[in-house]
Amino acid sequence: MTIVNQHADQRSRPRVSIAGQPRITDRHSGEIVGQLVNLSTDGLMIAGNNRIACHTVRQMRIPLMVAEQLVEITIGAECLWCEDTNGSGTYWSGFQIIAISAADLEILHAIVER
């Protein structure tokens, strides 16, 4: 089963791969949620060591490079799916962004539309 293709048809916007797969942290606990795989203005995919239950809402901090400068955005996102890749213990999770500031959304647009 190809997980990425299974969920790609449900996307409303194209996603871009993020070089270096930055670590995403929970805004409140500081816990590492996973590594950012790809991103759009309305969603993202994370690879991590822990299964994330569907419909879980997380507040996340995401470090991103914009014009050779490190910035951090904060989002609220709901997990729509989570799958273990071939029993490897790495979980791929798809999130829909449900809360983001106008300033952070501008940053996403700059990254996705470059």
Image: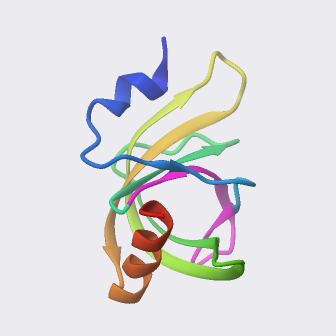
Task: Decide whether residue 111 is among the magenta residues.
Answer: no
Q: Nearer the viewer, residue 58 or 11?
A: 11
Residue in view at x 72 percent, y 22 percent: 88
Total numbered labels: 0
Query: Principal SS element in the magenta part?
Result: strand
Q: Specify start and end residues of the magenta stretch as a single range.
A: 23-40
* Residue at 68% over, 33% down: 90
Q: How is the image coloured?
A: rainbow
Rendered location of residue 85, percent (x, y): 61, 23
Can you give x and y, in whole percent of width and height, for residue 84 in the image? Answer: 59, 26
Is 7 rendered above or below residue 49?
above
Where is residue 34? Give x, y as percent: 66, 53
Along the line of sight, which residue is nearer the eye, 85 or 71? 71
Q: Is residue 56 left or right of residue 36?
A: left
- Residue sitting farthest toward the bottom: 103
- Residue 64 placement: quadrant: bottom right
* Residue nearer the viewer, 56 or 6: 6
| Residue 32 lies in the magenta stretch | yes
Q: Residue at x 53, y 79 (%)?
A: 73
**What's the residue at 24%, 46% (across, down)?**
12
